[in-house]
Image (cartoon, rainbow, N blue to C red):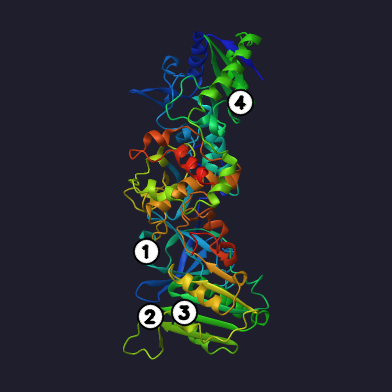
């Protein structure tokens, strides 16, 4: 450390490494897509479902899920909803702007574990698609390693849908079932209307072969899990990604705790069987 | 181990020597109460205080601490950790420091905390006067705790000063001319420890701390949380004065040129309304009762499950600091134990 008793900087768990916003693009009125490159040129080294701490100098730091699968050209992608100080600042930054990155942190979707060789059911509400997209891309990049793939995506309105080009591609992919719904339609909407659980009773899945991945707003989990239980999917085969305030990312600051669990270290991805008796979880 | 026996006069001369040689922090009078502050002369050192307003935690995890400096998108670590001696820490506060040592070193090493800690030589003093709310004996922290570098105990008119580590031995070098503690004095010191343990169990936790994690498992819906929390102002005073609360927030501060500035760590408290709020305003612990319970679960279950120690050291500061008079761990944990 400079200015004091010498501690090597590399060991400081709070020090971001320099990175650049390579490209960005608005996705909806509130969400923006970013491609980030670490100045060191090293790949981030994340697995789907993990998050990074993004620093905007002078504004602060915020935990953001990585939205791309690992190993795509050394850069990684984020989708950021404009809801707080850091995210508002990020939205205002031009391509080429300097930011800081720490991570990746936390647990990942078990793409190389419990999901391998199984049918996979992705259930995403709103920006819950952002971290899950990383796992979907990973599964599609390694297609022979998985069985049937089903993707459910629900948003408040048609204009809140993310990655519409990519979801259209998923819909057209053999062996992939893609279904979407909106809470409220608009004049041009001809698709399904209703909360995401309304898509579930029509699903034909084999519960013994299926692993479910769930990510969405806090209210969504318990209702989706009730439906999964009706479909006889066991808690061991349900993985949830839970949002909390992962301020430090390294298990110290206390903000992200779900009862005794530090989400930044034990999560954000949990096997539901491990948290179904943890009262603050869902 | 060096074990010296000195008069108060000799002790003061030794402390003045330490002050001349470097930074010394000690317990001192502040208004009608006591506080740790930089010592200018040995005469200001209070070894017979009951409890300090804030624990010595502030020297290892300062209320505000610059951890990074940034300019033009690059971040550098900063630390102003420098050698100092911390004089007159009570055993319960030493136990708290020892817990934080584990928590900040565990899993991911927090070099900011650990750098400050490494630079410190900590001298514990046995308790001469009890604060009204102390219950240290109930949680095993009434007498000298592990982790200190040296220990001072007043025995009658004499002081026994004993080194526990190499750092402590170096500190005691200035006492080379003093006589070694004699057997009678050391026997009286043993007696004093026994007396202290007895006196400080007057306010008694009626449950062994090691049983609390299990008891709390079944106490999630106990009425005590709602009952107490309904009086809570969510002011965070209990967090502020607690020697084992270490949750923090991180904030950026810029210079006139907004591309340059510092990132700062500041104390935070789990009783404050927005502690578990995420961007977008969803608050995962919106109810006061949920926050209140969380604090007692942290002390009684969550931290013990991480490091093996009951995370309340029995100093009683929260009891005194709470304006609503609802923050007494003895009362809360005894209520939990009653039902079982």
Please tell me if label 3 and label 1 are on a single chain. no
User: Marks 3/4: CA distance?
Assistant: 64 Å
Residue B154: % across, % down: 53, 15
Chain for disc number 1: B
Report the residue marked by disc 2.
Answer: A183
Question: Which of the two marks, 4 or 2, is nearer to us in this view?
Answer: 2
Q: CA distance from mark 4 to mark 1?
A: 50 Å
Residue ID for mark 3: A197
* Nearest to viewer (mark 3 / mark 4): 3
CB under 8 Å between discs 4 and 1: no
Quick check: B329 above or below B254? above
| Eye-nearest disc, 3 or 1 | 3
Sequence-first disc among 4 and 1 = 4
Q: Secondary structure at mark 2?
A: loop
Q: Residues within 10 Å of mark 2 (few under 14, many from 20)?
A: some
Q: Are marks 3 and 4 on the same chain?
A: no
Q: Helix or strand or loop: what does disc 4 sit on? A: helix
- Residue found 36% across the figure and 59% down from its top: A85
Q: Circle 4 marks a residue in which chain?
A: B
Closer to the N terminus: mark 3 or mark 2? 2
Q: Secondary structure at mark 1?
A: loop
Determine the chain carrying the residue at label 3.
A
Where is residue B165? Give x, y as percent: 63, 26
Q: Is residue B200 above or below residue A60?
A: above
Residue for badge 4: B167
Quadrant housing residue B102: top right
Q: How many marks?
A: 4
Q: Which residue is mark 1?
A: B280
């Amino acid at each position: 450390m400079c200015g004091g008793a010498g501690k090597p900087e590399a060991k400081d768990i709070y020090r971001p490494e320099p990175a650049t916003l390579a490209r960005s693009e608005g996705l909806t009125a509130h969400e923006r897509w970013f491609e980030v490159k670490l100045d060191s040129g090293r790949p981030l080294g994340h697995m789907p479902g993990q998050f990074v701490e993004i620093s905007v100098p002078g504004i602060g730091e915020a935990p953001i899920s990585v939205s791309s699968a690992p190993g795509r050209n050394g850069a990684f992608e984020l989708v950021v909803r404009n809801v707080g100080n850091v995210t508002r600042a990020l939205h205002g930054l031009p391509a080429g702007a300097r930011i800081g990155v720490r991570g990746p942190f936390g647990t990942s979707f078990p793409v190389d574990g419990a999901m391998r060789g199984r049918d996979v059911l992705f259930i995403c509400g709103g920006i819950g698609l952002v971290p899950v997209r990383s796992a979907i891309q990973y599964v599609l990049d390694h297609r022979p390693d998985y069985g049937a793939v089903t993707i459910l995506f629900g948003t408040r309105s048609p204009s809140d849908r993310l990655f519409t080009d990519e979801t259209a591609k998923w819909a057209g992919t053999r062996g992939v079932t893609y279904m979407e719904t909106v809470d409220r339609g608009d004049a041009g909407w001809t698709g399904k209307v209703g909360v995401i659980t309304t898509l579930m009773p029509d699903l034909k899945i084999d519960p013994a072969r299926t692993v479910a991945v769930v990510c969405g707003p806090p209210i969504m989990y318990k209702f989706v899990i009730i439906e999964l239980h009706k479909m006889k999917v066991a808690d061991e085969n349900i993985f949830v990604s839970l949002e909390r305030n992962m301020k430090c990312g390294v298990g110290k600051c206390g903000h992200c705790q779900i009862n005794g669990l530090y989400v930044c270290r034990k999560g954000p991805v949990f096997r539901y069987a491990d948290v179904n008796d943890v009262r603050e979880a869902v | 181990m060096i074990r010296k026996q000195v008069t108060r006069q000799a002790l003061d001369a030794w402390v003045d020597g330490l002050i001349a040689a470097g930074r010394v922090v000690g317990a001192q009078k502040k208004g009608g109460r006591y506080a740790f502050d930089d010592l200018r002369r040995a005469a200001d050192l209070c070894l017979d205080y009951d409890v300090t307003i804030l624990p010595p935690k502030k020297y290892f995890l300062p209320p505000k601490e610059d951890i990074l400096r940034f300019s033009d998108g690059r971040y550098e670590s900063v630390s102003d950790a420098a050698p100092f001696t911390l004089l007159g820490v009570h055993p319960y506060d030493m136990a708290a420091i020892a817990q934080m040592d584990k928590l900040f070193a565990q899993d991911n090493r927090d070099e900011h905390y650990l750098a400050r800690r490494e630079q410190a030589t900590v001298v514990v003093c046995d308790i001469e006067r009890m604060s009204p709310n102390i219950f240290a004996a109930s949680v095993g922290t009434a007498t000298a705790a592990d982790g200190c570098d040296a220990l001072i105990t007043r025995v009658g008119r004499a002081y026994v000063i004993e080194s526990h580590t190499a750092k402590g031995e170096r500190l005691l070098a200035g006492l080379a001319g003093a006589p070694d503690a004699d057997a009678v004095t050391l026997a009286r010191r043993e007696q004093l420890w026994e007396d202290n343990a007895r006196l400080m169990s007057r306010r008694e936790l009626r449950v062994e701390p090691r049983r609390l994690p299990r008891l709390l498992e079944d106490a999630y819906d106990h009425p005590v949380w709602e009952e107490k929390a309904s009086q809570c102002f969510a002011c965070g005073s209990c967090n502020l004065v607690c020697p084992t609360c270490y949750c923090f927030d991180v904030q950026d501060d810029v210079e006139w040129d907004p591309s340059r500035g510092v990132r700062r760590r500041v104390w935070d408290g789990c009783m404050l309304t927005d502690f578990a709020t995420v961007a977008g305003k969803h608050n995962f612990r919106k109810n006061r009762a949920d926050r209140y319970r969380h604090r007692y679960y942290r002390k009684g279950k969550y931290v013990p499950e991480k490091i093996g120690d009951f995370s309340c050291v029995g100093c009683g500061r929260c009891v005194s600091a709470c304006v609503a008079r609802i923050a007494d761990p003895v009362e809360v944990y005894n209520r939990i134990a009653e039902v079982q």
